[in-house]
Amino acid sequence: MPIKNDKESSKGSYLSDFVYGGIDGSVTTFAVVSGVVGASLSSSIVLILGFANLFADGFSMAVGNYLSTKSKKEYIEKIRKAEEVSIHSIPDEERTEIKEIFKEKGFSGGQLDEAVKIITSNKDVWVDTMMKDEFGLLEEKKSPIKGALVTFMAFNLIGFVPLLAYILSYLFPSLKEQTFLLSIIFTSCAFFIVGSVKGKIVDKKWYLSGLETLLIGGAAAAIAFLAGYFLKGLA
């Protein structure tokens, strides 16, 4: 099985940020659209609330991604520094831990001694091995800022799709009667496409992942529509 290098791994992480940001953007924006339509409010309200959701929720999600990635990196760096100190101050104990790790992997006798000797002869490899096998941690290569930007852009780009029909209805008044229907069609396509890409990332059948995302997005929209419908008397 091919081994991914750091650059390939980070690209995969950014793709995941794009997909999940896009899914969240399309789901929440279409929920806003559905809620406003359910409440029988005007198209201008759809656009006002829709764009407010795009920028505010997109920013919130990006900040959450940034803080989460940054915290993870800081935690991993903290554990790594502690391991480096332990290897320097109590090398025999740390060498024994490496021996136990490889014994559990099936090494024994001279093969085990040779593996321990090779691993502990290189400080970086030694620390990497302890991080992965003792703590289950891998160094986070993704930039918190880049991840946040990708999430924000994806949220706004894909989240704009439910609003596209309303923009078109202003440019082409003949579409006004079909605006919500067009929004449903555009958004359903976005749900399915982004869900299909997600399926590729998580190694799931693309059409099942696309259908799953479509159903989840549709359910969220239906709930918002019904909420708007039953609460429209308050408007």
Image: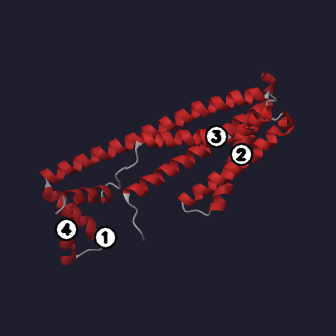
Give the label, 4 or 1, closer to the camera. 4
Q: Are marks 4 and 1 in contact (CB under 8 Å)?
A: no
- In the rendered structure, the answer to whether residue 172 lies left or right of residue 132 reads right
Q: Is residue 165 above or below residue 109?
A: above
Reading the image, the residue beneath label 4 is 118
Q: Which mark is residue 105?
A: 1
Q: Which mark is residue 187?
A: 2
Q: Amino acid at mark 3?
A: Gly
Q: How many marks?
A: 4
Q: Are marks 1 and 3 in contact (CB under 8 Å)?
A: no
Q: Are marks 3 and 2 in contact (CB under 8 Å)?
A: no
Reading the image, the residue beneath label 3 is 159
Residue ID at (24%, 56%): 127
Q: Amino acid at mark 4?
A: Ile
Q: Residues within 10 Å of mark 4 (few under 14, many from 20)?
A: few
Q: Which mark is residue 155?
A: none
**Label 4, label 2: how many angstroms apart (C-alpha)?**
55 Å
Q: Is residue 18 above or below residue 225?
A: below
**Label 3, label 4: how many angstroms apart (C-alpha)?**
51 Å
Quarter holding residue 163: top right
